[in-house]
Amino acid sequence: MKKFFYNIKKYFKYAIYSAKAELKSEVADSYLNWLWWIIEPLCFMIIYTFVFGVVFENHEKYFASFVFVGLSAWEFFNRMVTGSVNLIIHNRDLVTKVYLPKYILLLSKSFTYLFKLGISLIICIILMIFQHVPFTWMMILAIPIFVVLYILSFGIGMILMHFGVTLNDLANLTNIGLRMVFYLSGIFYNIQTRLKKHPKLVTILLKVNPIAFCMNELRKVLLYQTLPNFLLLGLWLVIGILLCMVGIHVIHKNENSYAKVI
């Protein structure tokens, strides 16, 4: 772990610079430029709100904000996981020519995803003001929830990044798994109210699925002025740290062999 934190400090500026360069390249050839970072999440929110709020008559309180909070958390998690699988392969030229701790690639990617998450949260706050959601001190508790979400995503991402070098089908398997998790995470429905006749299933979905848990806790503190489950939050934090430790160990052990494989 000492080597990990040393490398994070050493290559932090590079990760920031790389993230800025990637964000600029994303919109370089676009007429709307950076506006796409606002338009894209707004469009998804409108679509899901219409389909599940109007067509399926969902009467969840603050439904548009409910969807947007869940969608923002999901998009960050989804980008971290899918973006990590082929990250080393996609950076073949860099990996084969220059020594760089491989998790720095994921760190840099995470900065671009955090930037987009920040934009989504700004839109979410505006939407909450529009829907007259009460603003209380409990909203500050969203910060540790996002920290847990980041650590979990980073740990999972490092492990997938390692296995993505040798397992060609991992990207496809990951996409299938994420699609299943997407529908089971309650992004556009409340798991507790929709499945109240199946309490065991509710417990499994909200406690075993980390992204569903994080979404639910974020909605509690941001929309419904309810304290999060600190015990489970702490448990998922420990699990996230353990996943990060496993990922760091695996990458340190195999980082000299990646250039040969790819």
Image (spheres, rainbow, N blue to C red):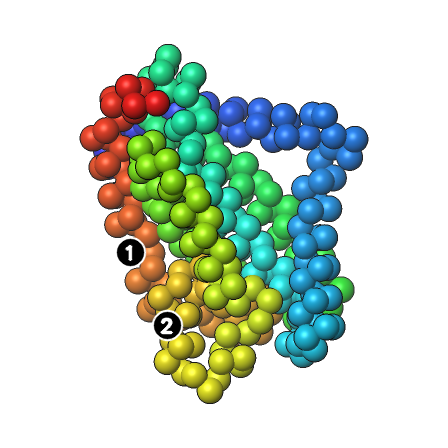
Of label 2 and label 1, which has the lower sequence position? 2
The amino acid marked with disc number 1 is: Val
Front residue (pair 55, 119): 55
Say whether marks 2 and 1 touch (CB < 8 Å): no
The residue sitting at 27% across, 26% down in the picture is 255
Where residue 228 appears, x then y in whole percent?
A: 44, 69
Find the distance from the CA under tag 2 to the CA under tag 1: 19 Å
Give the answer, above or below, for where 7 lies relative to 56.
above
10 Å crowding of disc 2: few (<14), some (14-19), many (20+): few
Give the answer, above or below, for where 220 lies relative to 240.
below
Label count reads 2
Where's the N terminus, which quadrant?
top left
Q: Which mark is residue 204?
A: 2
Disc 1 on helix, strand or loop? helix
Where residue 5 appears, x then y in whole percent?
A: 30, 33
Where residue 123 appears, x then y in whole percent?
A: 69, 53
List the single residue furthest toward the left: 253
The amino acid marked with disc number 2 is: Ile
The residue sitting at 52% across, 55% down in the picture is 74
Where residue 104 appears, x then y in whole percent?
A: 39, 30
**Residue 133 appearing in the image:** no
Disc 2 on helix, strand or loop? helix
10 Å crowding of disc 1: few (<14), some (14-19), many (20+): some
**Residue 227 appearing in the image:** yes
Q: Which residue is mark 1?
A: 238
Front residue (pair 214, 178): 178
List the single residue furthest toward the top: 97
